[in-house]
Image (tube, rainbow, N blue to C red):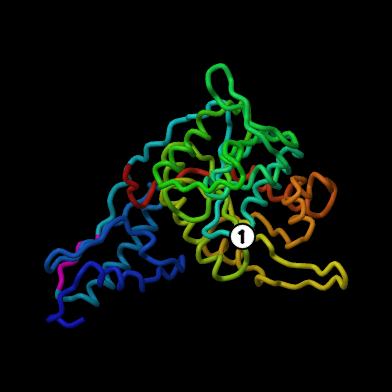
Amino acid sequence: MTPTMTLKTDGLRDFLTTLIHPQSDRKILDFISSFGVEGDSIRVIFEGPTEQLQFLESVRSLTEVQLKQHFPQHKILCALLAPKSFKSPPNILPTVKSIIAIASGKGGVGKSTTTVNLAVAFTQLGYKVGILDADIYGPSLPTMMGLTGKPEVTADKKLIPRKAHGISCMSIGFLIPPDTPMVWRGPMVQGALMQLLKDVAWGELDLLLIDMPPGTGDVQLSLAQQASLAGAVIVSTPQDIALIDARKALGMFEKVAVPVLGIIENMSVFTCPHCGQDSHIFSHGGAQATASTLNVPFLGEVPLRLDIRSGADSGQPDNIVQPQGAIAHCYRSIATHMIENISTASKKSPLIQILD
């Protein structure tokens, strides 16, 4: 850039996007708390948890060198701030030991099917489990669990979860007719979600799995701010287009201080029931490679199987129908890894501020 050109914040953003930290192979922009251009001054601020300060200092130093080389006509302020304390969300469900968000960056990757089968797997391992269907616009839990009708209400006006296969279930789908579209704006959706979370008599649960809507928007932020999550699990197919969005979902949870328990690769392989040949319809190994690159646990692979799909449509999850089958074993293995990661996960301070 020549001295006669005026640098704007958007131009600085474009430049920062090109910088990669060589040791972690991650974009330096991922570690930046704020940046801006004021006259002939460039300001870039880093902020992170105490245990990451040494690493962030190396990132800060590299960024400063690059900025001075490319913008010699500007004054460079490249600072690493002391970590701010992160106010943990209140414990709004004291009878639930751990709340886990099951999320994805995009729709169509089998997140809801994964949530239901993991819930069954946890019950088979001896845990008391609940599922909250947080997809207000497209609730699928009633169908997948074979449940119909409205929930009853306690004397103190709390909804009583519907039960199937020993699992406590709550969904907006229990409260509206199946074909009724939810034509609601964001604040209404957030309000409905928090009611389904807080105004329900969940009882004593070891785990509450929240089947999140796809994306990284208002619902995810509201949940992270208002509920104390034990962690989040990212579900993705192995194809590149799904993994791009999975990385965004993972980054969002990191920035709001929710530990990522791991990534699940769904629809990893299709085995022809007639000839037995394996076909990697959505590619293969992409989720595991992404987990390795981003330094998060890889929880396991789930194949693309007709019986998984038919079980979801009929309200009879495959690991209920075939509790000793290969698919049931697959989900129980993933569930076991999740439990191990819950016990070792530690919350990280957010790298950006999420405003109320």
Q: Main secondary structure of the magenta part?
A: strand
The one nearer the camera, 69 or 331, is: 331
User: At x 55% / y 51%, what residue is drawn?
Assistant: 103
Q: Is residue 76 magenta?
A: yes
Answer with left or right where residue 176 lies relative to residue 258.
right
Q: Amino acid at mark 1?
A: Val
Query: Mark 1 packing: few (<14 Cα in 10 Å), some, or many (20+)?
Result: some
Quadrant of the rendered image containing residue 67 = bottom left
- Name the quarter where the N terminus is drawn: bottom left
Residue 329 horizontal/vertical position (percent): 78, 50
Q: Residue at x 75, y 67 (%)?
A: 270
Query: In the rendered view, would you say 346 is above or below 43?
Result: above
Q: Position of residue 80 (x, y in %)?
A: 28, 55
Helix, strand or loop at label 1? It is loop
Determine which residue is flagged by label 1. Answer: 109
Where does the C terminus fall, quadrant-wise? top left
Instruction: Give how far across and how far down residue 180 sits, in percent.
Output: 56, 46
**Residue in front for this viewpoint, 175 or 308:** 175
Query: Residue 153 versus residue 289: which sits nearer the camera?
Result: 153
Q: On the rendered structure, is 119 left or right of 59?
A: right
Residue at 67% x, 51% y: name it. 113
| Above or below for 155 versus 285 | above
Q: Which residues are magenta?
A: 74-78
